[in-house]
Image (cartoon, grey):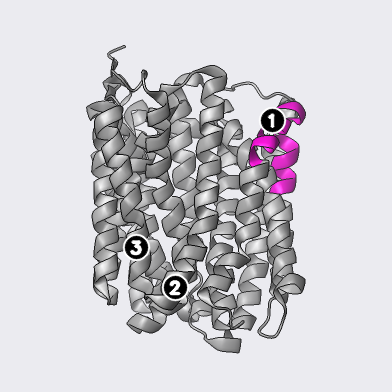
Amino acid sequence: MNRETSSARHEPRWTLVMSIAASSLSFIDGSILNVALPTIRAGTGAGAAEVQWVVNVYTLPLAALILLGGALGDHQGRRRWLVIGTTLFGLGSLACALSGSLEPLLAGRALQGIGAGLLLPNSLALLNGAYDGEARGRAIGTWAASGAIAAAIAPMIGGWLVQNVGWPSIFYINLPFVAAAIFIAQTKVGEVKEPEKARLDLIGALLATLGLGAATYGLTLWSQTFSLTPAASVGLAAGAVLLLIFLLWERRLGLKAMVPLSLFDNRCFSALNLLTFLLYGAFGGAMLLIPYVLIEAGGYSPIQAGLSLLPLSILLGLASPIMGKLAVRVGPKLPLTLGPIIVGAGLILATRIASDQAYWTNAFPAILVMSIGMTLAVAPLTSTVLAAVDKHQTGMASGFNSAVARLGGLIVVALLGAVLAGTGDALLAPFAKALIAMGIIAALGGLCALFGLRGQWIRNPEPLS
C-alpha cells in the first residue's frame, strides 16, 4: 500500500474539530435555507421553478460529485481537496450573501454545491483514518451529534437574521466555519493519500452531472402544471439519454468505474440504497415544505418556523447513538422496516397543518412522529450499508449511499412545483396531496428493508459480498 500520512494520526482531536467545522457547513446551510425560502422568493420575485432551483442547484453538483471528490482526495491528498472544497463553499456563500437577486444567488448556490461535493467525503475520510476501534465510534458519534446540534440552532439564528437583517445575511454564518476548517486543516492536520484506492472517473462524473441536471430541469418544468411542454420533454429525454450513456460507460470501466455496477449484484446493498433514495427523498421534501407552508399559510415568522423543527434535531442528536447500539442487538431489519413506515405516518399526519391551527396540536405531533421514525432508521442504515459490502468497498459504499440520499431529495424537490406555485391558503390542498404521496414513498422504503434484507440479517449482520 502506498499510503502517505503524517500528523493526521498524531492530532486526532484537531482532525475531529476540523471535520465538524467543515461538515457542519452542509447541515447549517440546508436547515437555514428552508426557513428563508419564502423571504427569498418574495425578495427576488422568484417563481415556483426558481424556488426549486435555489435548492436543487446546490444538491445537483453535491450528489453528482461526492464520489469524484473522494477519489480526488485519495489520489492527490484528502486534506488538499478538503481545503479546496471548503474554500469553494466559502466563496459560494459570500457570493450568495452579496447577491441580492436571483441569478447571482443561483451561481453562488452552485459553487457551494461543488465545494460540498469535494469537502464532505474527504472530511469523513480524514476523520475515519484518525481514530481506531472504539475511539473511532465515539468520534463519529461526536461528529454526528455536533451536526444535529448545528442543524437545530442554525434555523433560529437564520430566522432572526431573515427578520431583522435580510435573507442575504444568512449566508455569512458559513464563513467562520469555513475559516476554522481551513486554518485547522493547514496547521494541525497532516496530509493523507491512498492513490491505489482512487477511481478518477472524470467522464462518468460529467455524464452524471449533465444527465441529472437535464432530468431535474425537465421534472421541474413538468411539475408546474403536470403537462409535458416541449422544454420539459427535451429536458427529460436528454436526461434519460445521458444517464443511459453514463450507465454504459460505468459498465465498460468495470471495477475502475466511479460507481462499479457489480455492487448491485448484492441484493442487500441494492435494497438499502433504494430504501435510502425513498426515505431521504420523502423526508427532504417534507423538510422543505413544512416550514415553507407554516410561513406562507400559517402566518409563522421565520424564527417560529425554525423553532418548529427543533424537536427533530434534538431527538436525532440524542437518540441516534442509542439506536445504533440497540440495532447491533436486535439487528437492522426491524428498525429499518419500522422507521420509514413511521416517517410515512408522520408525513400523512402533517396534512392536518392548516392556516388556523395551533402548533402543538397539529404540526408538533407530525414532526414528533417523523423524528421517531428517522431516529429508528438513520444509524442502522449507515452501519448496515457498510456491513453489506466487503471491507475494501466500504469507502465506495458509504460515498454512494450519501449521493443516493441527496439524489432522492433532488428528485422530490423537482416534483414540488405545483405546491410551491401557490400562496397563502391555496398552498394547503397541494401541500396535503404532496405529503400523502411522500408518506407512501417513505413507507415503501420500509418494505425494501422487509423484503430486501436476508433472514440472517435479523441479528448481528455480517459483511456480505
Q: Residues within 10 Å of mark 1 (few under 14, many from 20)?
A: few
Quadrant of the frame with the N terminus = top left
Residue 285: image quadrant is bottom right
Q: Which residue is mark 2?
A: 37
- Tell me the mark number nearer the camera, choosing from 1 and 3: 3
Residue 291 lies, in percent from the top left, at: 56, 71
Where disc 2 sits, the SS reads: helix
Q: Earlier in the sequence, mark 2 or mark 1?
A: 2
Above or below residue 347? Residue 321 is: above
Cα separation between marks 2 and 1: 37 Å
**Dot 2 and dot 3 residues touching (CB under 8 Å):** no
Q: Residues within 10 Å of mark 2 (few under 14, many from 20)?
A: many
Taking the spot 69% from the left edge, 30% from the top edge, the residue there is 325
User: Which residues fall within the magenta stretch?
Assistant: 320-340
Where disc 1 sits, the SS reads: helix
In the image: residue 33, left or right of residue 355: left
Return the residue nearer the eye: 411 or 15: 15
**The label number, if any, that marks residue 410 in the structure image:** none
Residue 21 lies, in percent from the top left, at: 39, 43
Taking the spot 39% from the left edge, 50% from the top edge, the residue there is 25
**The label number, if any, that marks residue 171 in the structure image:** 3
Return the residue nearer the eye: 66 or 267: 66
Q: Earlier in the sequence, mark 2 or mark 3?
A: 2
